[in-house]
Amino acid sequence: MAPAALLPLLALLAPALGGASPACDHRPAQLWCRSPEVAAAAACQAPSGCAHPTAAPVELSLFYESLCPACRRFLVEQLFTAWLLLPAEALNITLVPYGNAQERNDSGKWQFQCQHGPEECLGNMIETCLMHEAKNFSTYFPVIFCLESGSSVTKTLGACLQVYAPQLDGDRIAACVRGDTGAALMHRNAQLTEALDPPHQYVPWVVVNGKHTDELQAQAETSLLGLICRLYQGEKPEACGSSGIPEAPPRCRR
Ligand SMILES: *[C@@H]1O[C@H](CO)[C@@H](O)[C@H](O)[C@H]1NC(C)=O
Ligand SMILES: *[C@@H]1O[C@H](CO)[C@@H](O)[C@H](O)[C@H]1NC(C)=O
Ligand SMILES: *[C@@H]1O[C@H](CO)[C@@H](O)[C@H](O)[C@H]1NC(C)=O
């Protein structure tokens, strides 16, 4: 999918997100407490009992590798969509690009070997350095979505930045990718992945609220939006009404 092709999608979904300046007139009163922005907006005349937030977000960690087809599909079709549709109070996402890679200490320097070859290692590194430079999830996730949904994960950073995060400096990301910072960050990803309990058997590997079970994994792959909607203890977000059930490609065994 070309990055530009996503703009209409984003525009289409924008009303569901609430937009930057919340308009209250079209929202039912029970939704006033749904986001701090809406609750705070004077025009909303939100009731004083609009306490917020009331529930912790569902914590989702995705352990993946940049070129695994099932990872790309999960990230693009399930995770990005769920993130777009749900308010930040409901879903907190951590991305760990490493997956079935291996590392070794080559006279003091970490060297990485990836399941789908050097290009996958580069893709993992680009995404890791992008996250490090951008810091803000809302800034880097659309860029990662753009990379993973396009024809090449490793050759489209410039184009994706231009569309989704023009304020980021591509040269700084490139320097991180080539340098010690990238290697140190990737080593951290390796440690996080190796620390998984139970250990991952394939990727994408989903951990929800600190837990991985076959059932959670299957539900996440079938309808992540539905799973988060079920698990979130706060007021049901608007998007928690319907969710499609796409067929999943096979996982990439380590
Ligand atoms: C999301 O999770 C991260 C990592 O666990 C944490 O640092 C952050 O505070 C969480 N954000 C929210 C809004 O809970
Ligand atoms: C990596 O190897 C170097 C030298 O070969 C050694 O000094 C260093 O302690 C090793 N680091 C780790 C984390 O094993
Ligand atoms: C992250 O970026 C979003 C969108 O630009 C912004 O609304 C939010 O305040 C930022 N968060 C932080 C912690 O800077």
Image: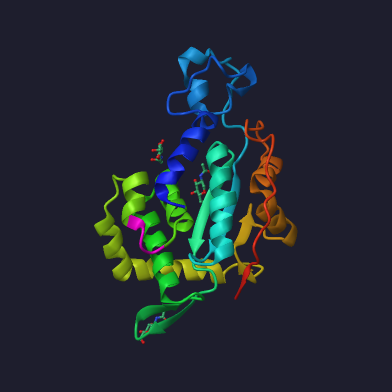
Left or right of 183 in this view: 49:
right
Q: Nearer the viewer, residue 242 or 8?
A: 8
Q: Nearer the viewer, residue 233 or 77?
A: 77
Please, is residue 228 above or below residue 41 in the view?
below
Instruction: Give how far across and how far down residue 238 sits, in percent.
Output: 63, 30
Quadrant position of residue 184: bottom left
Q: Is residue 243 highlighted in magenta?
A: no
- Scheme of colours in the image: rainbow
Q: Main secondary structure of the magenta part?
A: loop
Quadrant position of residue 194: bottom right
Q: Residue furthest left?
A: 171
Which quadrant of the figure shows ligand 2?
Answer: bottom left
Q: Nearer the viewer, residue 36 or 112?
A: 112
Instruction: Give how far across and how far down residue 145 sits, in percent.
Output: 47, 52
**Which corner quadrant holds the C terminus?**
bottom right
Q: Residue furthest bottom?
A: 107
Instruction: Give how far across and how far down residue 41 sits, in percent.
Output: 47, 19
Which residue appears at 39% of the width and 69% of the height?
A: 122
Instruction: Give how far across and how far down residue 106 sits, in percent.
Output: 37, 85
Left or right of 46 in this view: 186:
left
Which residue appears at 26% of the width and 52% of the height?
A: 169
Please, is residue 201 above or below residue 211 in the view?
below
Left or right of 210 in this view: 149:
left
Left or right of 222 in this view: 5:
left
Q: Is residue 156 highlighted in magenta?
A: yes
Q: Is residue 200 visible?
A: no
The magenta region covers: 153-157
Q: Is residue 233 visible?
A: yes
